[in-house]
């Protein structure tokens, strides 16, 4: 009896499963059956009689739309270029004629915006930049370095992978930028407003050197130095380009005839290096410059008499008395030597040159240091260019060339020592 009931129940389950499978198959066929032509989208078929013509017409329509869009963009770009050129010209005119600045209107933005607003914005950029006052930075890596340049060369710190420490400005935009800065300075120097009727005309040959740096969100600052009307006199112009026409910030006359430099050299032994240093010192500082005081801070007793003898011989041969010899006991410490040498000075204002015995410099470099320092305002940190071993660099030559011929700043000769720099600080009595 139980067996018959189980068989009946199993048969009913099998029939039910078969019915479900059939129903699912019917639904699947209905869902997957392709729609008729009347339900297809209205796109032309390639096999139809008008399919190819329909696609060609659609493509032609799209091309016309794109051509119209490109033409519209070109017209807008040309219009913007023309407006930019007009505003630059009017801004230059307003810079030299401030009274007319209020009459120059700005076409973009609200109608009440005037050219005076634009000038106010550009001058606000000058105030934000490090022109009149410095900005406190977290570390030395956050400081924006200056690059220097002359009419022939540019000396740069951030060389990257392609640029050299010393190179001619090859890129046209960089060359035109520096030339425009020098020409703008000359135009200011020769303008009747700036000088007297008998003032001489300045030319590019009067330009000595300049330094510049760019703050990405503000503009480019230029400090240009020209020869003065008399010996030891210079003319400096500070210009600022707030990502637009250059604006004159200030002009000043500098007299460096009485600016004394105290060169402080900490030393221990190294007599041969000191003898070579004194040969360069005699030529550059005593014979050419003449406004130098030398302070030698010597550590220990060993070879001290030889160093003093070199100083005395130089003093007698060149009639030079502006030197100080300070003996110290203990091991050599550059920082301690520089501190003792700086504190030993008891005279009037002097420019302290923290130097090493193996550094070569020129008389022009000393003037550069005078021009880039200000008492209580500005300290000058020139970065050293470290030369490689001359025996390796000039190994393919028959002999190592003279020192004057080795003074080149390029990749084969050496590299800038980022963490090694000299200091120029003004100290008072």
Image (spheres, rainbow, N blue to C red):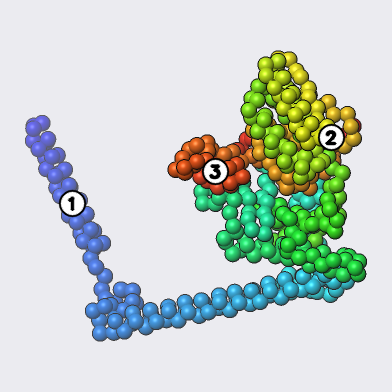
Residue 395 position, x and y percent, is 46, 40
Q: Quadrant of the C terminus?
A: top right
Does 342 sit above or below residue 137?
above
* Residue lying at 60% horizontally and 41% vertically, measured from the top left: 403
Report the residue marked by disc 2.
Answer: 427
Q: CA gap, disc 2 to disc 3?
A: 39 Å
User: Residue 401 has which mark?
Assistant: 3
Q: Is residue 360 left or right of residue 378?
A: left
Does 321 sit above or below residue 236?
above
> Toward which corner of the image does residue 302 lie, by quadrant?
top right
Residue 142 position, x and y percent, is 66, 41
* Residue lying at 23% horizontally and 58% vertically, measured from the top left: 28
* Residue lying at 51% horizontally and 76% vertically, measured from the top left: 70
Question: How many residues crowd mark 3 within 10 Å: few (<14), some (14–19), many (20+)?
Answer: few
* Tag 2–tag 1 contact (CB < 8 Å): no
The mark nearer the N terminus, 2 or 1, is 1
Please state the total of marks drawn on the protein image: 3
Most foreground residue, 404 or 385: 404
Does 55 sit above or below residue 363?
below
Report the residue marked by disc 1.
Answer: 21
Asked whether residue 369 is in view, the answer is no
Most foreground residue, 49 or 328: 328
User: Residue 246 has which mark?
Assistant: none
Residue 206 position, x and y percent, is 76, 60
What is the secondary structure assignment of the residue under circle 1?
helix
Question: How many residues crowd mark 1 within 10 Å: few (<14), some (14–19), many (20+)?
Answer: few
């Amino acid at each position: 009896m139980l067996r018959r009931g189980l068989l009946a129940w199993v048969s009913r389950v099998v029939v039910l499963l078969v019915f479900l499978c059939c129903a699912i198959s019917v639904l699947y066929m209905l869902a997957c059956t392709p729609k008729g032509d009347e339900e297809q989208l209205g796109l032309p078929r390639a096999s139809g009689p008008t399919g190819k013509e329909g696609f060609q017409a659609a493509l032609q329509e799209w091309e016309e739309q794109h051509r119209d869009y490109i033409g519209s963009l070109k017209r807008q770009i040309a219009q913007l270029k023309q407006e930019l050129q007009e505003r630059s010209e009017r801004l230059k005119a307003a810079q030299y004629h401030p009274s007319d600045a209020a009459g120059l209107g700005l076409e973009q933005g609200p109608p009440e915006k005037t050219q005076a607003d634009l000038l106010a914005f550009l001058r606000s950029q000058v105030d934000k930049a490090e022109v009149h006052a410095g900005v406190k930075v977290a570390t030395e890596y956050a400081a924006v370095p200056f690059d220097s340049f002359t009419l022939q060369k540019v000396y740069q710190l951030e060389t990257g992978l392609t640029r050299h420490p010393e190179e001619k400005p090859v890129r046209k935009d960089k060359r035109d930028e520096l030339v425009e800065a020098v020409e703008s300075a000359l135009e200011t120097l020769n303008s009747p407003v700036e000088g007297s009727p008998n003032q001489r005309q300045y030319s590019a040959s009067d330009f000595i050197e300049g330094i510049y740096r760019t703050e990405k969100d503000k503009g480019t600052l230029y400090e240009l130095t020209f020869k003065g009307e008399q010996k030891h006199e210079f003319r400096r112009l500070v210009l600022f380009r707030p990502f637009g026409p250059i604006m004159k910030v200030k002009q000043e006359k500098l007299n460096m005839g009485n600016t004394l430099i105290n060169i402080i050299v900490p030393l221990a032994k190294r007599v041969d290096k000191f003898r070579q240093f004194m040969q360069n010192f005699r030529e550059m500082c005593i014979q050419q410059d003449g406004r130098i005081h030398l302070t030698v801070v010597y550590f220990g007793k060993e070879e001290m008499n030889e160093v003093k003898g070199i100083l005395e011989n130089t003093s007698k041969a060149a009639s030079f008395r502006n030197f100080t010899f300070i003996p110290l006991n203990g091991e050599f410490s550059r920082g301690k030597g520089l501190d003792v040498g700086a504190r030993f000075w008891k005279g009037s204002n002097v420019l302290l040159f923290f130097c090493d015995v193996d550094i070569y410099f020129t008389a022009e470099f000393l003037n550069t240091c005078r021009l880039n320092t200000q008492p209580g305002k500005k300290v000058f940190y020139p970065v050293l260019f470290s030369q490689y071993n001359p025996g390796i660099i000039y190994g393919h030559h028959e002999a190592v060339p003279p020192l004057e011929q080795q003074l080149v700043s390029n990749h084969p000769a050496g590299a800038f020592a980022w963490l090694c720099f000299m200091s120029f600080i003004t100290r008072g009595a």
